[in-house]
Image (spheres, rainbow, N blue to C red):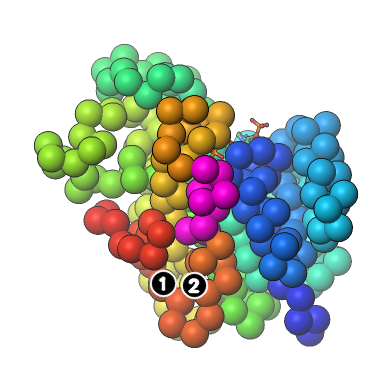
Amino acid sequence: MSSQKIALVTGANKGIGFETSRQLAERGVKVYMGARDSKRGIQAMKTLQSKGLDVTFLLLDMTKREHFVEVKEFIERQDGRLDILVNNAAIQIEDPTWSQNTTTTISPDVLRETFEVNFFGLVELTNMLLPLIKKSESGRIINLTSILGSLTLHDDPSSPIYSTKTFAYNASKAALNMYTIHLAYTLKDTPIRVNSAHPGWVKTDMGTDAAPMSVEDGAKTTLDLALANGNAPHGRYIHLGKELPW
Ligand SMILES: NC(=O)c1ccc[n+]([C@@H]2O[C@H](COP(=O)([O-])OP(=O)(O)OC[C@H]3O[C@@H](n4cnc5c(N)ncnc54)[C@H](OP(=O)(O)O)[C@@H]3O)[C@@H](O)[C@H]2O)c1
C-alpha cells in the first residue's frame, strides 16, 4: 500500500474546503477536490497545481447520486482506498445576514434543499464511500457541522449563538451531528475515526466579512482531525481541539 494518504474534500472550490485541500496537499496528502461546477472546480485545482500540489478535481454535486457513484468508482480505480473524507460542502440559503429567526417562516422548499445538501447527500455519499475508507489503515471522516447545530447551546440563553435561529441550516447541522454519533457507534471496533468539526466563525462567502477567523485558521480543526494518529478522537464534536456540547 502506498504511504501517501488519499483524501476527498467536498465543496473544495472555495472557502474552507479549498483551504483544507491546500493545507492537506501541503502536508503531502493526495487530494481529490470535489466541486459541483466544472469551471469553478478546474480553476481551483489549477490554482493549487500551480503551487506544485497533488490535487485533482472531481465533479461532485451533493444532490446528484450519479456523481457519488462516479467519484467512488474513480477513486477505487486510482487508489483502491480512501484515507480521509472531509464532508465540507454545505449551504445556508435562508438568510444571508444570519440575523432573522426563520423558524416559523421557513419555506418547505428551502428546508428540503438545505437538508438535501447538508444532510441527505452527505449521508449517502459517506455510506457509499465507506467500503473504500475501510480499506485504509486509519480512515478519518470529518463532518463539517457548526456550533449552530448544538441543541444544548441553542437552549442556553447565555450562549453566544442563542439568538441565531436560522432554522433550516441549524437543524441540518444538528441532524448531521446525530449521524456522526451513529456512525461513530457503528465504526467503534474499526480503526476509522469519525467526528463533527466546527471550524469557527470564518471569513468566507458563508461566514461573511464580519467573521473574526481567517480561512487559514478555519481549516485547522479539520486538519488536526484528518491527520490525527494514535489517540484520535472518535464520535466527538470538536472546535480547535476542544469539545463542544451536543
Ligand atoms: N464560514 C463559517 O463561519 C462556518 C462556520 C461553521 C461551519 N461552517 C461550515 O464549514 C463548511 C464550509 O463552509 P464555508 O464557509 O467554506 O462555505 P462557502 O464559502 O459558502 O463554501 C461552500 C462550498 O460548498 C459548495 N457547495 C454548496 N452546495 C453544493 C452542492 N450541492 N454540491 C457540492 N458542493 C456544494 C460550494 O460550491 P459553489 O461554489 O459551487 O457554491 C462551496 O464550494 C460548511 O459545511 C459550513 O456549514 C462554516
Image location of residue 43, percent across then percent down: 82, 37
Image location of residue 135, percent across then percent down: 67, 78
Residue 151, quarter of the rendered image: top left
Is residue 65 visible in the rendered image? The answer is no
Name the quarter where the C terminus is drawn: bottom left
Q: What main secondary structure does the magenta stretch of the protein show? A: helix
In the rendered image of this protein, does residue 205 appear above or below residue 11?
above
User: With 216 as the anchor, is 13 left or right in this view?
Assistant: right
Residue to which mark 1 is pinned: 234
Name the quarter where the N terminus is drawn: bottom right
- In magenta stretch: residue 182: no
CA–CA distance in space, label 1 to label 2: 5 Å
User: With 147 as the anchor, is 80 left or right in this view?
Assistant: right
Identify the magenta region: 214-222
Residue to which mark 2 is pinned: 193
Q: Nearer the viewer, residue 210 or 120?
A: 210
Q: Which of marks 2 and 1 precedes in the sequence?
A: 2
Residue 73, quarter of the rendered image: bottom right
Q: Are marks 1 and 2 in contact (CB under 8 Å)?
A: yes
Residue positioned 34% across, 27% down in the render = 166
Q: Amino acid at mark 1?
A: His
Q: Nearer the viewer, residue 89 or 181?
A: 89
Q: Secondary structure at mark 2?
A: strand
